[in-house]
Amino acid sequence: MRRWNGWGDDGVVATLAPEALAFLQERIGTGPAPQDATLEAVCAQIPVSRLPEHPLVDRSPEARLRGSYGQSLGDWIALRFGRIGRVSDGVAFPESREQVRELLDWAAAQKLLVIPCGGATSVVGHLSPATEEPRAVLTLNLTRLRALTHLNREAQLAEFQAGVLGPDLEAQLRAQGYTLGHFPQSFEYASLGGWVVTRSSGQQSLRYGRAEQWFAGGRLLTPGGELSIPPLPASAAGPDLREWVLGSEGRIGVLTDVTVRVQRLPECERFLGVFLPSWEAGLAAVRELAQARVPLSMLRLANAVETDTTLRLAGHAGQIAWLERYLAWRGCGDGKVLLFVGLTGTAAQVNAAQREAIKLLRGFGGVSTGQLLGKKWAAKRFAGVYLRNALWEAGYMVDTMETAIPWGGTTAMVEAIESAGREALARFGERCHAYTHLSHVYASGSSVYSTFVFRIGASAEESRARWLALKAAVSEAIVAQGGTISHQHGVGRDHAAYLPAEKGAAGLAAIASMVRHFDPAGVLDSGNLVASGE
Amino acid sequence: MRRWNGWGDDGVVATLAPEALAFLQERIGTGPAPQDATLEAVCAQIPVSRLPEHPLVDRSPEARLRGSYGQSLGDWIALRFGRIGRVSDGVAFPESREQVRELLDWAAAQKLLVIPCGGATSVVGHLSPATEEPRAVLTLNLTRLRALTHLNREAQLAEFQAGVLGPDLEAQLRAQGYTLGHFPQSFEYASLGGWVVTRSSGQQSLRYGRAEQWFAGGRLLTPGGELSIPPLPASAAGPDLREWVLGSEGRIGVLTDVTVRVQRLPECERFLGVFLPSWEAGLAAVRELAQARVPLSMLRLANAVETDTTLRLAGHAGQIAWLERYLAWRGCGDGKVLLFVGLTGTAAQVNAAQREAIKLLRGFGGVSTGQLLGKKWAAKRFAGVYLRNALWEAGYMVDTMETAIPWGGTTAMVEAIESAGREALARFGERCHAYTHLSHVYASGSSVYSTFVFRIGASAEESRARWLALKAAVSEAIVAQGGTISHQHGVGRDHAAYLPAEKGAAGLAAIASMVRHFDPAGVLDSGNLVASGE
């Protein structure tokens, strides 16, 4: 069963090693005992649904609760403390495109607000209705639309219903010898349609691309009609309508079918752990790897604090000490940074790329530890996020913020983000353990992904105030440094206020105009992406 | 001086070898002697300009004539026969963004139609005003905006003014050690801004990408304001506004500044000529090369007729006969096809990719002839288009049509396009020499680029009727086979009628709505892309 107030399957219990706990206690203090509410107590608060009956709609409090929250820290605080806000009035689980159409038309006739929902893994507040929303709210949960409906082997194009979740999608493709290769950390529960409408990026995007690269076409049911986009390999015929669906975040229609560009399952895959002597060396090395077009599948560079945190939280203190002595002897002492290098392809391609990458990395003082750390990373690539549960239970909250910026601005951005987070918490007399990695590297720049660990407050209000202060301070730092307000999570309601800085007044007005064109009555006007009334 | 009624510099004279002429005479008959009008005679037909005076506007007949035609066959027929239609009322040559703004505002106040123009290499009728256009027409020629305004070496981002032409752009970059690598056949005269707004694709797009991949950001002056797009490496923050500028074809604003992703000049570059025994073998081979992700810079596969035509038109009949005997002995006899393989990168990357490509091609019966044919191709890559001048003078017209389609539909598409062209001409009792190559190959499909050579008619009207019949028949065949109406040339006015088939009614309405949003008064409503009043 999926956990209702945290991450993942409730059969999976992550635990924090004693060293890890000690490490955090030393840095940010001992966390308070959490005051978790029970599911029953939370459901009991939910008012009667304002939706009329409909055979496809579940109006039970639990379904409405589960349909109204994602995985942002704000969502966690609300659910854990049992201090929820406005929830959806009902959740529909359509099983066909026709049912989606029927529900959209019913919602328009009943003047409801419709919020589409995939795997409910949003971390930017896509799913909760605004407190001030006057209409009854219908959540459209699309996860029963999960079939592989067509596979064109010759063109390596696979058509899926859009609600399919990551593992199900990969299992259906793998049975045919293919992969999409899209592995965000939320892979276990995230949906294909969600990836498209939030412009998701997976850990191995260097090979498999972002949603922009693999989203070949599909069908979007809009309040007024249907947008059908053929899966052409390329086109110079005017604006590319895929790009209007990508990043649309449920504001212009409901994505029901997605054709994706797939690849044959790779013959060979490896993840190497390589240490570099300093952040500057690591930065220069990943930039050079990207600009030299070495055909890798992943480059993931942790800064010194994240590197240290990873080694501390790994347990095995004895082995780590031995490793650090060896690394120091090879020139990677204090301030060293850890780079994971992904290699994917035929055995020949992987071997050639590895030789080229290692040779280049040596020029920057890189020390490869082979596949040992890489295998550990790969084994835990979707498990790490369960640690948030263990951290909460130890009294700690975790938030993450991410952006992207051209090379030249990376270090200033990392410093601005981390200090903004620390200063925001300092205003509460709290410390914040902040660390950063570059999760995606391009020839012209990279993403910047920062994690903040800080203590839960004495109350829901206090915890929420800390979260909001951190979010605002970091978002303002991102915007001030010229970064995007999201590299891979989307905008939602949480970041909508920062979108104008990126798009400009003219850009935002154009997006708002497009939204009004597709949805003049505002059936999908949730406030995601573009604030209502913009 | 640039030729006013044909391609290119009038100091460059292409000639047709006697064998080539004989080859065409045998296939489609002897061409009539052309009846070319003089520039003076054509200019004398041009009525007085309806534009008020403006210090930045040239209202001379020659400037207006040159500003009103591109390189479509329809344009050629009009100019060569001296049977022109409606021309622009004046051409402005702004030298700054401020002057573009001033001209746009002046045009709006004067209720003019503005048609932006780069290097005037459009082959789909972007530049001529519609005959029925009631307003005075101002052409905005942007080619004096040609400076490299900023180079960020660290991020490999170069900012140019948008009117810079291909050779000038490359010269400015090469002086700094960089290249954009964008080489369409029209490279010599095409402009950067034109490439962006028509979603251009260069011959080596397999390495350097289409305009979509290298267009990082820029500034668009719209009738109501300015859209400024930062050159982020990636963003998940809502719709990507670059994609609204790409393919906008002058309908939403004037692109004045373009930031492009550049690369270091490659250490090594090679073009190999490889023959394959049949079209089917060639098709399977290029698909496999793309899907196996062999890092090449170009794959260009001619069908059997184009291969034969290339060999016949090359001259050197004796050497060709020897080559063909050798190829036949190696299994590539009648029906053989020629593939050009481009390799670009470091010497090590090029050598590794060449080994991988040649090994794979051998599996399909491929016979490499090394760099001999490839060097010839590369030396003539921008010269071939001058042959259109020589062909006209020999009595032959040339038109090209192009599309893209997923693998599986390629052969049927080629057959449909070539037969449509032949049948259209047969209705005039004329033969048509049609041949095709795949100019751009992707994992999921390819472009299809067909050339049609047929005789000039006895009059402008007769020639135009042949051209229009061919264009309509081939466009209908493309649409019927599910291809895009343009892979690399854009839509213009010539193809606007076929855009609804690709975008659907909902898609076209959305594009029209976006155009209205940016340009509510229709200052830029030339009928390009979306027919006026759509």
Image: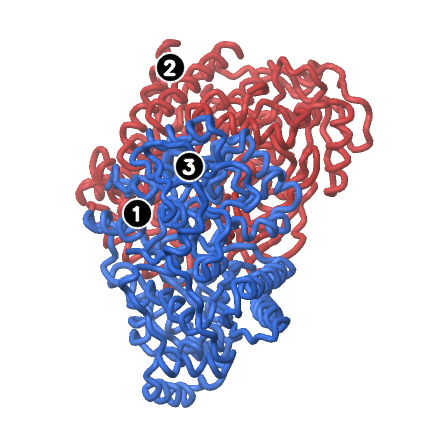
Chain colours: A blue, B red
Q: Is residue B499 visible?
A: yes
Helix, strand or loop under label 3: strand
Q: Quadrant of residue A329?
A: bottom left
**Vertical relation: B378 (above or below) A371:** above
Q: Determine crowd level at label 1: few under 14, some 14-19, many 20+ residues with C-alpha closer than 10 A.
A: many
**Total numbered circles:** 3
Residue on which disc 1 sits: A262
Residue on which disc 3 sits: A254
**Vertical relation: B509 (above or below) A189:** above
Towards the viewer: B279 or A121: A121
Residue type, numbered disc 3: Val
Real-space Cα separation, disc 3 to disc 2, in angstroms:
43 Å
Query: What's the chain of the residue with tag 1?
Result: A
Please tell me which residue is depicted at 52% across the width and 36% down the height of the picture: A135
Q: Quadrant of residue B403?
A: top left
Query: What's the chain of the residue with tag 3?
Result: A
Residue B441 location (% of width, % of height): 35, 42
Real-space Cα separation, disc 1 to disc 3, in angstroms:
23 Å
Residue type, numbered disc 2: Ala
Towards the viewer: A74 or A47: A47
Residue on which disc 2 sits: B424
The nearer-to-camera label among 3 and 2 is 3
Tell whether B123 sits left or right of B39: left
Helix, strand or loop under label 1: loop
Tell whether B519 sits left or right of B429: right
**Vertical relation: A518 (above or below) A61:** above
Residue A205 location (% of width, % of height): 39, 56
